[in-house]
Image (cartoon, rainbow, N blue to C red):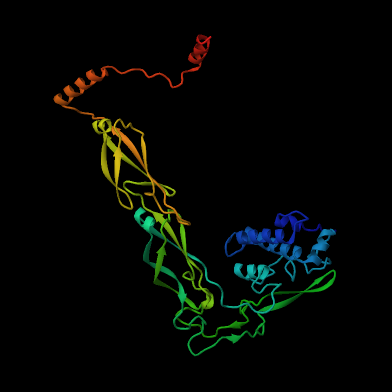
């Protein structure tokens, strides 16, 4: 009985006309979900073997052509060795870890690589938060920060070898960093390459690793970093300190350190970009008669003039008393919101004076205010009255 060809496109979840990049992304996503190092479920492991074999077929132009013609390059007689054998649906990677598989397919000594990969690699970036007051954000500040990152091993200076020893060429791959595998196909023998399982693609092994860093060339340590925070920063802003991040494997170039600002809430001012807002409570009598007060801003002490008859909701703007602009020139404004305070408790004498004032002003009873500009019917009435 003739066997049915496997749906390799369906295993990866891509259409038949998918590009090589789409197939690669689909496999990368599935491999990270199903690899035994991540998902110990037996069903996931079997599924991982299937999608891996599917990617191996569809990433090979010759095998993909067989699939597109309706054949199965991994079935007996179809150009492969069948399940479990070389090129089959068993474990085509001989127990390699997830990182090795990613290297094999996506760089770092895989089928498309040439020569061994370097142990020395770029370090990762690091992130550390820093709490700043509004005043510190306004003026800028320099602070010494304690940072825990990977640093260069002081014993082996990044080589990974114990003092007095050196790495040796791998006997398995002879320093190539990869080994070749021959597979049969309809078009003949196909030679593929994968990272050497002994040296993991480096082309050399470390017989006597450094005891301090265990051969990694770096150790974790706490150090002090000077951070210069510019004026005008705000909550969530990140300041980049070049070369102050993680040292890379093998003593590689460090990444960058990003200092993320966490702006603390101020007791008097609220911030809106480069502008500041505050509220001033003015007694009823002072609002009626007018007054002045000394207002402490972030930069100085300003005279705040409150005109006679000032109402609640009035906003007085003090120009140039806000926050500096982080990128560029200029300073924002300070908006002072006036809130007129009506007394809630008065004694007999105060009540007598207030009643006398109300009599003098004819304000013994409240009045219903007319709507501004009138309503629809009043405008209609006025239009007829004007005829």
Task: Estimate the x, y position of residue 325 in percent, counting from the top left.
Answer: 44, 54
Location of the N terminus (image quadrant): bottom right
| Foreground of the two, 217 or 353 | 353
Task: Estimate the x, y position of residue 32 in percent, counting from the top left.
Answer: 61, 61
Seen as rendered, the residue at the extreme left is 349
Image position of 24 (left or right of 232): right
Image position of 323 (left or right of 216): left
Specify whether residue 75 is in view: no
| Foreground of the two, 351 or 224 | 351
Task: Estimate the x, y position of residue 346 in percent, counting from the top left.
Answer: 18, 27
Task: Estimate the x, y position of residue 249 in percent, counting from the top left.
Answer: 53, 75
In this rendering, is residue 384 above or below 110? above
In this rendering, is residue 193 above or below 5? below
Image position of 282 (left or right of 259): left
| Foreground of the two, 240 or 320 | 320
Residue shown at the point (43%, 20%) measured from the top left: 371
Image position of 342 (left or right of 26): left
Residue 155, quarter of the rendered image = bottom left
| Foreground of the two, 95 or 29 | 29
Specify whether residue 210 is in view: yes
Seen as rendered, the residue at the extreme bottom is 164
Number of numbered labels in the structure image = 0
Residue shown at the point (37%, 58%) measured from the top left: 139
In this rendering, is residue 361 above or below 103? above
């Amino acid at each position: 009985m003739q066997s049915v060809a496997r749906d390799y496109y369906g295993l990866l979840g891509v259409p038949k006309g998918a590009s090589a990049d789409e197939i690669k992304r689909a496999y990368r996503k599935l491999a990270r979900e199903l690899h035994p190092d991540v998902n110990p479920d037996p069903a996931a492991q079997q599924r991982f073997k299937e999608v891996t074999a599917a990617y191996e077929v569809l990433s090979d132009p010759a095998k993909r052509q067989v699939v597109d013609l309706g054949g199965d390059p991994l079935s007996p007689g179809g150009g492969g060795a069948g399940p479990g054998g070389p090129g089959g649906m068993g474990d085509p990677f001989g127990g390699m870890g997830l990182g090795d598989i990613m290297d094999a397919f996506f760089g770092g000594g895989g089928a498309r690589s040439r020569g061994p990969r370097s142990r020395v690699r770029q370090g990762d970036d690091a992130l550390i938060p820093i709490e700043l007051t509004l005043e510190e954000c306004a003026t800028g500040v320099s602070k010494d920060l304690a940072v825990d990152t990977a640093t260069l091993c002081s014993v082996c200076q990044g080589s990974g070898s114990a003092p007095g020893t050196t790495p040796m060429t791998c006997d398995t791959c002879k320093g190539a960093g990869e080994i070749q595998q021959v597979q049969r196909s309809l078009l003949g023998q196909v030679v593929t390459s994968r990272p050497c399982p002994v040296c993991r693609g480096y082309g050399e092994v470390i017989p006597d690793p450094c005891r301090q860093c265990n051969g990694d060339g770096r150790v974790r340590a706490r150090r002090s970093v000077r951070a210069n925070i510019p004026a005008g920063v705000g909550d969530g802003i990140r300041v980049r300190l070049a070369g102050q991040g993680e040292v890379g494997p093998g003593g590689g170039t460090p990444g960058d350190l990003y200092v993320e600002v966490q702006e603390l809430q101020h007791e008097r001012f609220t911030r809106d970009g480069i502008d500041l807002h505050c509220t001033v409570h003015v007694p009823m009598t002072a609002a009626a008669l007018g007054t002045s007060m000394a207002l402490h801003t972030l930069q100085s002490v300003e005279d705040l003039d409150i005109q006679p008859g000032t109402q609640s909701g009035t906003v007085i703007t003090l120009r140039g008393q806000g926050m500096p602009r982080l990128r560029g020139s200029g300073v924002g404004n300070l908006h002072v919101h006036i809130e007129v305070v009506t007394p809630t408790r008065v004694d007999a004498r105060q009540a007598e004076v207030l009643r006398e004032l109300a009599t003098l002003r004819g304000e013994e009873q409240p009045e219903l205010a007319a709507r501004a500009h009138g309503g629809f019917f009043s405008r209609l009435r006025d239009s007829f009255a004007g005829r």
